[in-house]
Amino acid sequence: MERALPGLLVAAVLLAGCTTTGPAQTGASGNPGGGLAGTSWVLVSMPGAGRNLTAVPSQPPVTLEFRDASTLDGSGGCNQYGASYETEAQRINISGIVSTLRSCADLAVDDRESAYLGLLATARYYRINGGSLRFLDGEGNELLDFVSTAPEPAQLMTGSWVLDSMAPGPGAGLPVLTGTQIDATFGANGLLTGSSGCNLYFARYSVTGASLAIGLLATSKNSCSGPPGIMSQEQSYLSLLPQVAGYDIEGNQLVLLDNSGNGLLWFEPGPGS
């Protein structure tokens, strides 16, 4: 199947070994696309002289995006391209490659783009390791190396957040009292700062994968008279922070979790985030 790029002049790139082998298969993760759907990558190396992998210049970038469980597209550095793909376990088959016909001003970019599209069609296996993706041919030779363009979850967490609700006990989260604000700023330097409604607080934090550890808290010592319940709310919030063992990003919401994966604190993006 050829996938034409809307509004662009396209032509089939006729390459050996790019015929499909049948209907889309279930991937390694148990889902069509083998977990590739929705991921974006940029090429960092491909074979050079002697077929040894050689670093690819970062500009112009060569990109690859798996739009869904069966189609992909990207930039070869000069032209846009698209194709269909199938996966089964760690196997991949990319077919029906099409490309725009723009003339590249830099011959080196043009040659690299042509070689890249040819290698895509010969990919038969793929491997994902953390933030890297590697394509191999049918004999297990390395063809193309990519790195993910998606930000790490910890990077998504960095910034300012305003507390929406918390769960100081079993059951649904309790909203923050009207007229009060509790916030948290996760700095890129590993420092957590914020207001607990009345007092300021700070602590060190560390992230490993989806795990989050918050160190010893230090706070100012003010006493606020209102609104009613502000001090007990603050105490509840500060008592939950040491229980945090993980986090999750759900859309624009940051959820801090206990060691059983239960939600403790729900934050919305703060001003300027």
Image: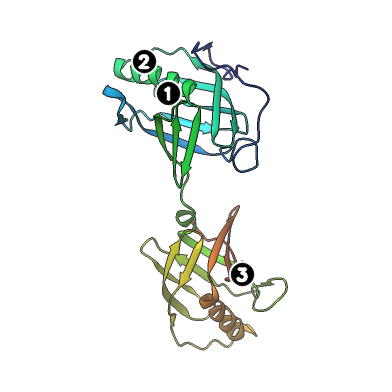
Query: Closest to the observer: 241 or 71?
Result: 71
Q: Which mark is residue 76?
A: 1
In terms of image quadrants, where is residue 141? top left
Residue 199 coordinates in the image, percent (x, y): 48, 81
- The 10 Å Cα crowd at callout 3, few under 14, some 14 to 19, many 20 or more, is few
Identity of the amino acid at label 2?
Answer: Cys
- C-alpha span from label 1 to label 3: 45 Å
The vertical placement of 140 against 130, above or below, is above
Disc 1 on helix, strand or loop? Answer: loop
- Residue ID at (50%, 31%): 125
Residue 140 coordinates in the image, percent (x, y): 43, 30
Q: Which residue is mark 2?
A: 104
Which of discs 1 and 2 lies nearer the camera? The answer is 1
- Residue ID at (51%, 16%): 17
Identity of the amino acid at label 1?
Answer: Gly
- Res 196 seen here: no
Which one is earlier in the sequence, the residue at label 2 or at label 3?
2
Identity of the amino acid at label 3?
Answer: Ser
Q: As drawn, is 110 to the left or to the right of 125?
A: left
Disc 2 on helix, strand or loop? Answer: loop
- C-alpha span from label 1 to label 2: 11 Å
Furthest residue toward front: 139
Which of discs 1 and 3 lies nearer the camera? The answer is 3
Residue 246 coordinates in the image, percent (x, y): 54, 65
Q: Quadrant of the N terminus?
A: top right
Q: Which residue is mark 3?
A: 260
Disc 3 on helix, strand or loop? Answer: loop
Asked if the residue under mark 2 is in contact with the one under mark 1, i.e. CB atoms within 8 Å, the reply is no
Query: Closest to the observer: 75 or 175?
Result: 75
Residue 268 coordinates in the image, percent (x, y): 58, 61
Which one is earlier in the sequence, the residue at label 1 or at label 2?
1
